[in-house]
Amino acid sequence: MGKFSYENQGANVFLVYELDKTEIIDNLSLGMITNNVIPGMIPMIYMQLDTKRFFKYNITSKVTVKQLFEGMVTKKRFLGMCRGVADAFISSYEYMLDDNSILLDSNYIFADVSTCEAEVVCLPVVNDKEENKNALPEFIKKTLLENRYDQSEDVGYVTSIMNYLNSSVMFSLEGFRNILDEIEKNTISEKPTPIATVVTPEKHVKTLVNTNVQQQVNVPNQNISQQSQEPTVQKPVIQRAVEVKTVESKVVTPKPVPVQQEIPPLVLPGGKKISKIYLLRHYDKETKALYDEQQKAIKEHEAKVAAIKKANAAAVAGNTTVSAPPVKQSTVTKATPAKQKKATAATNVGFAIPGQNTVMQNTTINTPKPATSISGPGVTNVDATQFQQQALGSAADQRTVVKSANFGETTVLSNVEVGGTQVLSNVSLNSNKEKTATLIRKKNNENISVNKDIFKIGKERSYVEYFIADNPAISRSHACIIKRGDQYFLSDTNSTNHTYLNGNMLASGAESELHNGDEIKFADEEFYFRIN
C-alpha cells in the first residue's frame, strides 16, 4: 500500500496518496470518481509525475472524524459520520465501485465541523480482497465503543444503533439509513407504554388545611445582612379550603404474549452471492440472469423480514397493559397552636405543614458581622477570615490571591503576616507548578487561557474552544494547540488561509513546537504565545 501526506496549494488543502509501484489502478472506478460528484465520497483528481502516481483529495476546511470525536461526542456529530459512511457504501453500488476500496479509518474520514457531514476516501485500485459484508457494521460498533457521549443529550440513539447492528437479520444499508433518519426525527419505531385507565368517583372529599401564607419577596440588589436585622412580624394564620380527590385504579390483567414468528434464513439462487464487481468482470447472460435472481430474492427476503418484525412488535404491544398503582387518600391533621408557634419560630418566612416535622421555608440568611480587615502595600481590603482560609486552606497552591474590582489581572500577595503565619511568595512554592499557556490577541490585547490539552481555534462556536467571530478570514476549524506534558505544539487543521508561526506557514496536519514569545498568525489575525 502507498502512503498519505498533506499538501497546500493556494487556498486548498489536499490529502495526497502516492501509489506503490505494485498497485494497479482500476480505470473504471477512477473514471467514475473523477467525472462524478459521488455522495459520501471526497472529490479526487489523478496526477502522474514521471513514474510517480498520485491521488489528491480536496479536504479544505474539513477535519478528520478522529479530531471531530475528541472530547464528548454529540448526537449531531455521530449521526453525521454514520450517514456519510452509509451514503458512500450505497453510492459504491450505484456507481459500480468496489466497496473494499473505501477506507474505514477515522483518520481518513473527513467532516465539516458545522454540518457534521462526513465523506470517505475511496482508492480506485484493483483489490484482491474478498467482499467483507461485516466491514461497515464492525467499524460502527468499534466507533460506538471507543468514544464518550455528551450526557446532556438523550443518548438512547447509541443503544438503538447498537441493537440494530447486533440483530440476527442480515445487515442492510437501506435499513441502517432508515434507522439513522428515524433517530434524527426522534420517531424511532418503539410504541410508548400504555397507561392504565383511571376512574375518578363523582364524590369528592373536602378538608381544611391550616397553612401559613406568609411569603418572602426577593428584592434585587438588597443586602442579606440588612434583611436579617429587620424584626420579624408574625402574620395571622389563614385557613384555606383545599379539595382533595380520591382516585381508584383499574387494574387490567395482561394477556399472554403470543409466540413470535421466526425469521427465515436467506436462500440465494446459485449459492454464493454475486457482487456487481464480479458481474462486470465475468459478464455473460447466465451470470446476469443469476445476479438478477439473487437481487430479487434479497429484496423479497428483506420485505418478509420487515413484515415479520412489524407483526411481532404489534403482537407484543397489543397484549401488554400496565396498571397504575392505587392512590392513597390524603389525610390532614389540624395543627395545634403550640406546633404553629414552634414552626413560626423555626423560620421567619415560609409555611408549616401540619402533622409533619419538616418545615418548608424560604430562609433568611443571617450573615456574621465582617471581621477586622487587613491591608498593606498592594493589598486590597479583604475579610480576615476569608484571607486566612485562602492563605492556609490549599495545599496545591498556597498563594493568597485577591481579584481587583474589574475582574482583570490577579494580584499575588507575599510576605504578609496573618496570625503569626507568613504567606510565602510564589518563588519558593511554585517551582513544581504545572505550566500554563496564554494567547494574547494583538489588536485588542485579549488574554486567552489555553486550558485544554487540545485547544481548538476557529469560528464554529459549537466546535472550538476559542471562537473568533469578527474575522471572516478565519476557517470554522482553523488550528489547534496541543499540550503534551510541559510542551505545546501548534497544528493547522486544513484551514483555507493557513496558519503561520514566526512568519513561516505551517503544513496542514504537521505539528510545530511552541516556545514562550512566539508569534502566531491565523490567516491575518496575529497573536503572541506566552508560557506562564
Image (spheres, rainbow, N blue to C red):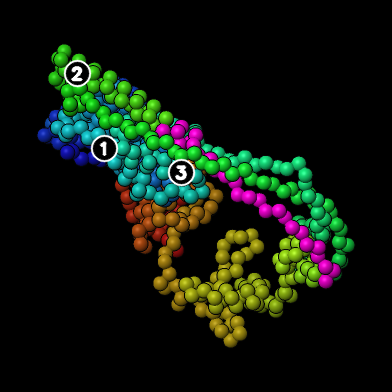
Quarter of the figure with the N terminus: top left
Decide whether residue 201 is among the magenta residues. no
**Residue 380 location, x and y as percent?**
64, 71
- Percent across and percent down for residue 507 are 31, 43
Q: Nearer the viewer, residue 490 or 324?
A: 324
Identified by mark 3, the residue type is Gly
List x then y, in percent, for residue 101: 23, 32
Farthest residue to the top: give it.
285
Residue hosting label 1: 135
Instruction: Give the crowd class for mark 2: few <14, some 14-19, many >=20 residues within 10 Å.
Output: some
In the rendered image, is residue 17 in sight?
Answer: yes
Instruction: Find the magenta span and give its range.
Output: 312-338
Quick check: is 326 in the magenta stretch?
yes
| Res 95 visible | no
Give how far apart the Cα atoms at labels 3 and 2 are: 42 Å
* Outermost residue to the left: 22
Q: Marks 3 and 1, how far apart in space?
A: 24 Å
Rendering quarter of residue 85: top left
Main secondary-structure element of the magenta-colored stretch: loop
Residue at 17%, 26% in the rendered image = 271
Residue visible at 52% across and 74% down? 394
Closest to the observer, 302 or 498 = 302
Mark closer to the observer (2, 1)? 2
Quarter-of-image position of residue 122: top left
| Quadrant where the C terminus is found in the figure | bottom left
- Residues under numbered marks 2 and 1 in contact, where contact means CB atoms less than 8 Å apart: no
Numbered tag placed on residue 372 in the rendering = none
Residue type pointed to by label 1: Ala
Label of residue 156 in the image: 3
Residue lying at the far bottom of the rendered structure: 420
Q: Which mark is residue 290?
A: 2
Q: Amino acid at mark 2?
A: Leu
